[in-house]
């Protein structure tokens, strides 16, 4: 695959404010358009921090993070929020659904803050219903309260919310860690079928090497992170 990168990091340095004991240094890392990548690393190795840098919820002290060629550091904080809403689907470790909202409300939520993403689909409600079906959820669940669903169902709703409006990049933070092995495999197959159908790139982080077979490429955190002496 030779397609252009959807995501590039160059010489990125990040430290959490007030935390001298951890530093994330990424000399070079890229994900190509349409590629599915699993990034493996132990707990505490900086996987979630890296995803926060890619989402633009935190900004690197130095270096460049490009998403679709856009340098996130050059945007204002509000601009980064808007850019994320328009172009990145996010599946959080804890799913972060609104428990009192319906399944449909939760899936449509990202479109509220993203007019371009909203405009990419003719009818968002129809796409939400299609996603529910293709992710293996019963159609009548659209009106159910998200907080009433099982963990496996909530996770599929979180996936549908990331996929709605066809963002070019989906990032997922250990989204299968709460599921048993069989449910994990089904979930990944459904997520992959949906992202492949849209040509979406997928970057998932996990500590679980058993997920590797599903992905185009598997990368270890230790391969992309440069270790440095941390003075404490
Ligand atoms: P992983 O996702 O691989 O488990 P994290 O990125 O969550 O790793 O954590 C890497 C380091 O950054 C840890 O030392 C963790 O304590 C620290 N860290 C993570 N999130 C925050 C935060 N919001 N504020 C301060 N330190 C944080
Ligand atoms: Mg994490």
Image (spheres, rainbow, N blue to C red):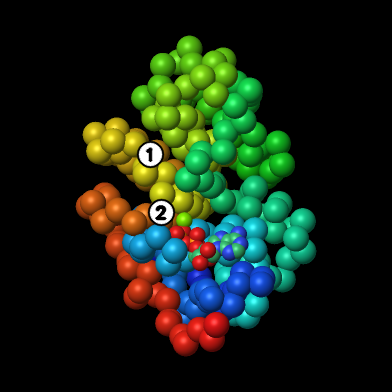
**Around disc 2, counting alpha carbons within 10 Å, would you say few (fewer than 14), some (14 to 19), or many (20 or more)?**
many
- The answer to which of 64 and 13 lies nearer the viewer is 13
Residue labelled with disc 2: 204
Question: Residue at horizontal 26%, vertical 56%?
Answer: 209
Q: Is residue 221 left or right of residue 106?
A: left
Residue 187's disc number: none
**SS of the residue under disc 2:** strand
Quadrant assignment, res 44? bottom left
Question: Residue at horizontal 63%, vertical 53%?
Answer: 84
Question: Residue at horizontal 63%, vertical 80%?
Answer: 62
144 versus 59 height, above or below: above
**SS of the residue under disc 1:** loop
Residue 178's disc number: 1
Task: Residue 147 in the image: state x and y as whole percent.
Answer: 55, 24
222 versus 186 height, above or below: below
- The answer to which of 133 and 91 lies nearer the viewer is 91
Q: Nearer the viewer, mark 2 or mark 1?
A: 1
């Amino acid at each position: 695959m030779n397609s252009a990168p959807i995501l590039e990091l160059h010489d990125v340095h990040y430290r959490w404010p007030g935390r001298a004991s951890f530093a994330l240094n990424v000399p070079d890392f890229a994900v190509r358009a349409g590629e599915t990548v699993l990034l493996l690393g132990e707990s505490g190795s900086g996987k979630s921090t890296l995803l926060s840098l890619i989402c633009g919820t935190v900004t690197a002290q130095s270096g460049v993070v490009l998403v679709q060629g856009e340098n996130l550091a050059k945007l204002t904080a509000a601009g980064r929020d808007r850019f994320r809403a328009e172009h990145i689907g996010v599946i959080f470790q804890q799913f972060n659904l609104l428990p009192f909202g319906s399944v449909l409300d939760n899936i449509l939520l990202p479109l509220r803050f993203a007019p371009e993403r909203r405009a990419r689909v003719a009818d968002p409600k129809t796409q939400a219903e299609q996603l529910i079906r293709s992710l293996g959820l019963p159609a009548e669940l659209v009106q159910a309260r998200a907080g009433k669903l099982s963990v496996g169902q909530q996770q599929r709703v979180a996936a549908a919310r990331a996929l709605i409006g066809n963002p070019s990049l989906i990032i997922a933070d250990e989204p299968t860690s709460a599921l048993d092995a069989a449910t994990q495999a089904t979930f990944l197959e459904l997520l992959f079928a949906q992202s492949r159908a849209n040509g979406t790139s997928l970057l998932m982080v996990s500590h679980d090497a058993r997920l590797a077979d599903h992905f185009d490429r598997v990368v270890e955190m230790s391969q992309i992170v440069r270790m440095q002496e941390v003075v404490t």
